[in-house]
Structure formats: C-alpha cells, structure tokens
Image (spheres, helix red, strand yellow):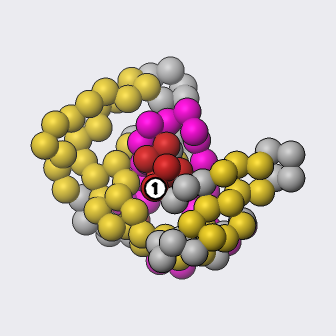
Amino acid sequence: MDNKIFDQVISILIDPGSNYSYVNTNLVHKCVLRKEVHAKSWLVQLVTGSKKIVHHCVRSCAFKLNGMPITTNLNVMPPEYYSMVLGMDWLHLHRTKLDCYDKAIECRDDNGEKIIL
C-alpha cells in the first residue's frame, strides 16, 4: 500500500475496535505536525495493555491511504506499533465497509466519492 505523510512511508492500522483515530507521537515530531491541547483529556488502553492519557490532537492532518488523499483529525498517542490508527470515528465519517473475504475496503473520499482500496 502507498500510505504516506509528507513523503514519509507510514503504517496504518484500520481498527473498528477503537472509538477514535490516532497518530503516533514520533510521527508528529518527525513531520513537525501542529498539536493542539484537548479541552478534556482521557485514558486509552494500548494493545500492550498499558494505559496512557491522551492530551493532544492534530487537526486536519493530511496523508495518503493507499494513494488516496485524506484529511482528518487525529489524537496523539504514545509510540506503539503503527504510525496511525484509523478508528470508528474515521470509519463512520467515510461510510466504510470492510470486506474481509475479498480483502477490500470500500469508503468515501473527502469529496464523498465511493472508492475501493
């Protein structure tokens, strides 16, 4: 897949088990993304079982998902296995359908056009 942010190749996890979408704090620093402080922080449990507080977000973060340009808000998470996690907030917004049998993702781009990845 062609997943990139500022020509930096990234790994993206599509996770319907996550309520929100996240960007790795290392990627935020490497790409000099502008962070904003959340009005209210919350606790998130990571895949390792550890729990971390989410304090920041990156608004209107532009990246490419399999070559498709995307702009979305991302919460800043501590370093883990992936550069980015697209959760239910993103999946719902883009009316995403996951086809596990054919290994395809059907969603709508930022303009509302249906695409298959």
Q: How many marks?
A: 1
Identify the image quadrant of the N terminus: bottom right
> What residue range appears in magenta?
1-28
Asked which secondary structure carries label 1, the reply is: helix
**Where residue 13 appears, x then y in whole percent?**
60, 48
What's the residue at 70%, 57% (across, down)?
A: 105
Residue 64 in view of the camera: no
Q: Relative to residue 38, is residue 19 drawn left or right?
A: right
Judging by the rendered image, the residue that carries numbered circle 1 is 93
41 to 10, vertically: above or below: above
Looking at the rendered structure, the kind of residue marked 1 is Leu
| 24 falls in the magenta region | yes
Q: Relative to residue 9, is residue 33 drawn left or right?
A: left
| 9 falls in the magenta region | yes
**Where residue 11 appears, x then y in whole percent?**
61, 56
108 to 96, vertically: above or below: below
